[in-house]
Amino acid sequence: MKTLSQDAVRGLMIAAQGLDDASQPPATQQAVRSTIRQIHMLQIDSINVVARAPYFVLWSRLGDYDANWLDALLEAGALFEYWSNANCFLPIEDYPLYRAGSRIVEEKNPNKWLDEHATVVEKVVNHIRTYGETRSADFQRTDGQKGTWWNWKDEQIALEYLYFLGELMVRKRHNFQRYFDLRERVFPDADKLPKVSFEEAHDQFVLYTIQALGVTKAEWIPHYFRLKKAWVNAALKRLEKQDRLMTVAVEGWEKPGYIHPDKLKQVEAAAAGEIPHSKTTLLSPFDPLVWDTRRIGDLFSFDYTIEFYFPASKRIYGYYSLPILYHNRLIGRLDPKAHRKEGIFEVKALHLEMGMIVDDALSLRLKVRCKPAPRGTRRRKSLCVMPPNQALPNVSRTNLQNRGWAKREMQRWVTKT
């Protein structure tokens, strides 16, 4: 096989993530499930500037779809929630892998707290046995303290730690609140499944990562499932010995990249010049293509920092800036705000990478992509507005002066449905 170019690696990774521009039929509930199966996890986060992370990640791949499908798949048992890269929606088929051993259990050591608070644990478990599915909000705080993100009541900690241990599962979500229930009620067949060893589980996580990234360096692998480097290195040795993965030379890389055997035909085609081409879309900060900032800096030369953790005075690109994927590149960041009552998707600022030329094609692609915005952004209409005095702060003015129409379009988009 020929040495892969960096362009080919980018295209293969984009395709492996389901972000290529291959034609697709209208989205269905099955497509939602298949997409999660393809990327192996869907990270959950509650920030709702535009749409919450799992719904946004699906929109980037599927376009307009019914957000209720994700909740329905969870309640039907096709998905389950657990800690992977973070708290995630996961394919139910992978449940045995997480039962084999989870880093979150090692990090949090929930058994110690549960043993020290046996009375609280008994209270919580008895409540669930008696009343069924239960929220944290069903327990009143009695210590006089105010609940905050970092100051949980004991019952909430108990729910969380029993969830880490697999004694409880999330039966459903309503208004994004979790409803916990006993494992035997949510997934009655869980204890009948074949046992998977710790090593077997981590071998599969490494294979999933290679599959989801298309082509990867060894050092990129641990971050995807948040595995320890020692676990990954041991898994790679086992898999190489078993001939369950393959390698390929990549220009500019000191060591070969890893590929999944199932991707061999696509890799060979890319090496011959048939490189997958990306959609034009916006990406959530929690999208698996970009959540490893070291990887995207290395492969896409894109320096990305999630700034909502910073005070306003320290932000450069905005509270919730979204990477823009265009022609297999990450070309900039869009800082949005959804005004749900008014049905408005506001573009507060657009920051493009230096040297990026704004032309009619880029303007049109971005305009189309903001219609429709992710589910939850609008009600009866979609209105996308960019204030002229905030538009394009990092774009070469020379480029714009020769493209007056594009400048006007990028400064104010208005699309009504």
Image (cartoon, rainbow, N blue to C red):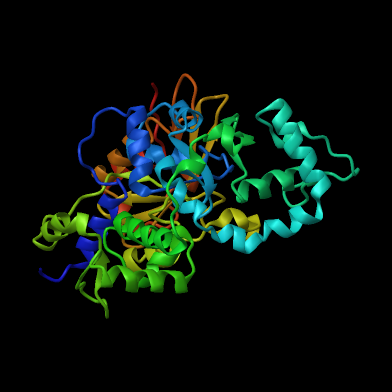
Left or right relative to 244: residue 349: right
When the figure is inspected, residue 368 is found, relative to residue 8, above or below; the finding is: above
Direction from residue 10 to residue 156 in the image, left or right:
right
Q: How far across and down, in percent of the image, does residue 267 sit?
A: 17, 59
Q: 260 or 395, which is in the foreground?
A: 260
Where is residue 199 shown, x and y percent of the image? 42, 64
- Is the C terminus in the top left, top right, bottom left or bottom right quadrant? top left
Residue 218: percent from the left, percent from the top?
35, 71
At 55% from the left and 61% from the top, the residue drawn is 103
Residue at the far top in the pictured view: 380
Quadrant in which the N terminus is drawn? bottom left
Q: Quadrant of residue 201?
A: bottom left
Residue in the image at 51% along x and 25% along y: 343
* Extreme residue in the bottom direction: 254
- Give the quarter of the image for residue 223: bottom left
- Total residue callouts: 0
